Amino acid sequence: MNTHTATKALSDHLAATFSESDVQRRADVFSRDGFVKFGGDQPLVPAELLRAVDDEVSRLVEEHTERRDLQLRTTGGTPRKMSVVRSEQVEKASELISGLASSEELLGFMARVAREPVIASVSDDERFLITHQEHKGDTHGWHWGDYSFALIWALRMPPLRAGGMLQCVPHTHWDKTDPRINETLCERRIDTHGLVSGDIYFLRTDTTLHRTVPLTEDGQRTILNMTWAGQRDLRKSLEGDDRWWEDASASAAEAVGRDER
């Protein structure tokens, strides 16, 4: 599927699927929870587009994954245990994903849900990330994002008994020098969201502390992350040498063995 066909199909689907009241209900949920999920009888994208993106991601995972097993100082030592496909590899190898992430159709709809502009202007290494968890204990530990928004395509999800759920604590703040994650978890309610393959969710990443529940058995948990900015991000300088997905030897990252929990 080429980008023109994809964006036309997306535009037609959004117009046919979501009334203004549907959008506003989701905007209310997003404002309250920092998270809103699309799926079931109101999917964000048409089935043929989801299949096309899934095929692209499966190919990229097969060709380009790099393993990461580390803990990150700027999030209080929380773990990263997964394989990744870096942004530049997605950008070069998938015209469909790259074009879709910057399309007026998708950005305009998500701006209605966010109730503010959603802008495809982030650092090159942040535009995309594919993560693939497959081993018992794999997880993306508690963290925030440097930018305001992410659209997450949950393309392969394990059964709930095997973990992999998303947990969120909205309306929180990230201080990279003193992240206070455990204190925040004690003070605040943790929302847990189950996901099935094909769900897509929109996340306010800079103010929502979040993680994936570690896998309790071998399996597959594969997502595509599209990162976007808000107006507040455009003059932001990125702090801390902690871009672990791009560089496993980032100074804030400490390598750990795969079996270390």
Image (cartoon, rainbow, N blue to C red):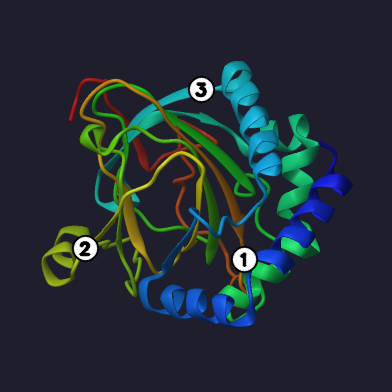
Q: Is residue 260 left or right of residue 79?
A: left
236 vs 46, nearest the viewer? 46
Amino acid residing under circle 3:
Glu
SS for dot 1: loop
Q: Which residue is most to the right?
A: 4
Q: Quadrant of the C terminus?
A: top left
**Furthest residue toward top:** 63
**How far apart in space, not on screen, are marks 2 and 3 (Cα)?**
31 Å
Q: Is residue 154 left or right of residue 104?
A: left
Callout 2 amino acid:
Ile
Residue hosting label 3: 66
- Determine which of the numbered discs, if any, sits on residue 190 in the image: 2
Q: Nearer the viewer, mark 2 or mark 3?
A: 2
Q: Residues within 10 Å of mark 3 (few under 14, many from 20)?
A: some
Residue visible at 34% across and 75% down in the picture:
171
Residue occupying image coordinates x 61% and y 21%:
64
**Where's the N terminus, which quadrant?**
top right
Q: Circle 2 sits in a helix, a strand or a loop, which is it?
A: loop
Q: Residues within 10 Å of mark 2 (few under 14, many from 20)?
A: some
Up/down of 211 relative to 244, above or below = below
The residue carrying mark 1 is 229
Q: Nearer the viewer, residue 17 or 251?
A: 17
Mark 2 or 3, nearer chain start? 3
The percent position of residue 174, horizontal first and vertical second, equals 35, 66
Q: Is residue 88 visible?
A: yes
Alpha carbon separation for disc pair 1 and 3: 26 Å
- Please name the residue shown 26% across and 42% down the image: 213
Whether 116 is drawn above or below 44: the answer is below
Task: Name which of mark 1 and mark 3 comes first in the sequence.
Answer: 3
